[in-house]
Image (cartoon, rainbow, N blue to C red):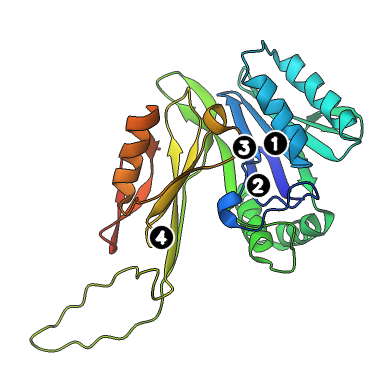
Amino acid sequence: MTLIVGRVHDENIKIYSDSKITDINSVRNNALTANLKCFILHPHICLSFSGNVHYAEKFLEKFYSNTPFSFSNILQYCLILNNESNNSTHFAVSLIDNKIMRLFKIAHGKIESEIQSFWLGDIDAYNVYQKTFLESDSEKTPFEKMGKAFEKVIKDEKLETVGFFEISVSTVFIPEISSKIFRYNLKSSAQIAPHTFQLTSENPVHLMTYGTAEDGSYSEVFLTSITIEYPAVAIHFFQGKFGILFCPALNHNKPLIFNNQPDGQEFANHIKREYNITLSGLVLKNGNSFMNILGRV
């Protein structure tokens, strides 16, 4: 199953999703077999799905086969696939329509339009999310509450159908084109193994590092594509010395995996050389500091 939540607030849209695939036709328990569940199809259109991954893959295969698609075609094809799946696959479509934020949900054989929020997936996971959202500090914005509540769901080991990477999408304003577009969000996290050191008069300074895979340390940094023609999100694992790239136009819902990538900046450079996709964000440099590889998001 999954959990995906989306909301309109203050003339913007934000969407959170997990990336774990657990449907009966495609059981995948390794995080490196994570699947993208939110697809930026166009700078102004984002598609999300839950349920049987086969029908999401069927949509993507047709969409990226040069078949002409209007926005109405997207909604209608999602409805066809929802019915074909016997309601086992649900969709949500988010649209930036001439500066107006619009959400649509396709489930139970119908299209819900002009809604202000949606959720797809596991009811138990949604209940945990909703409880945390409603109990959050009233001074926080709805988007801040969404982030806190979704993080709790991702970390809840009792929710076996939700997990792996948390991937989110937001609307952002791009001055160069005087328009808002959808873009995958930046994120970074690290877990550093404890270690001891001794300071002496001869050695009064100790440079802390983010550790190694051997000592159990772990980090992941999310980079976002600023190449409008190729919306994408990449994740670099410094200790693991590899990276992955989710780009719907290149590999639909599946990750491209790049081994032997110990340096986050070089990983981003590799993506640029290979696919002409420019990534932006923070990467770990030399294991002891973060560095902004582009200076814009």
Which of marks 3 and 1 precedes in the sequence?
A: 1
Q: Which mark is residue 253?
A: 3
Q: Nearer the viewer, residue 200 or 130?
A: 200
Q: Earlier in the sequence, mark 4 or mark 2?
A: 2
In this rendered view, identify the residue nearer to me: 240 or 173.
240
Earlier sequence position, callout 1 versus callout 2: 2
Q: Is residue 101 visible?
A: no
Which of the two marks, 1 or 3, is nearer to us in this view?
3
CA–CA distance in space, label 3 to label 2: 13 Å
Give percent across and percent down for residue 84. 88, 29
Report the Cα–Cα distance between label 4 and label 2.
24 Å
The residue to which callout 1 is attached is 48
**Left/right of residue 158 with respect to residue 283 in the rendered view:** right
> On residue 210, which mark appears?
none
**3D distance between C-alphas at marks 1 and 3:** 11 Å
Closer mark to the observer between disc 3 and disc 2:
3
Q: Which residue is mark 4?
A: 240
Q: Residues within 10 Å of mark 2 (few under 14, many from 20)?
A: many
Binning the other alpha carbons within 10 Å of mark 4 as few (below 14), some (14 to 19) or many (20 upward) gives some
The answer to whether residue 3 is left or right of residue 196 is right
Amino acid type, residue under disc 3 in the picture? Asn
> Of marks 3 and 2, which one's residue comes earlier in the chain?
2
The image quadrant where one finds the C terminus is top left
Alpha-carbon distance for marks 1 and 2? 8 Å
Task: Give amino acid for label 4.
Answer: Gly
In the image, residue 216 lies at what x, y percent?
Answer: 43, 74
Tags 1 and 2 touching, CB below 8 Å: yes
Residue found 40% across the figure and 29% down from its top: 275
Query: Are the residues at dot 4 and dot 2 in contact (C-beta closer than 8 Å)?
Result: no
Q: Which residue is mark 2?
A: 17
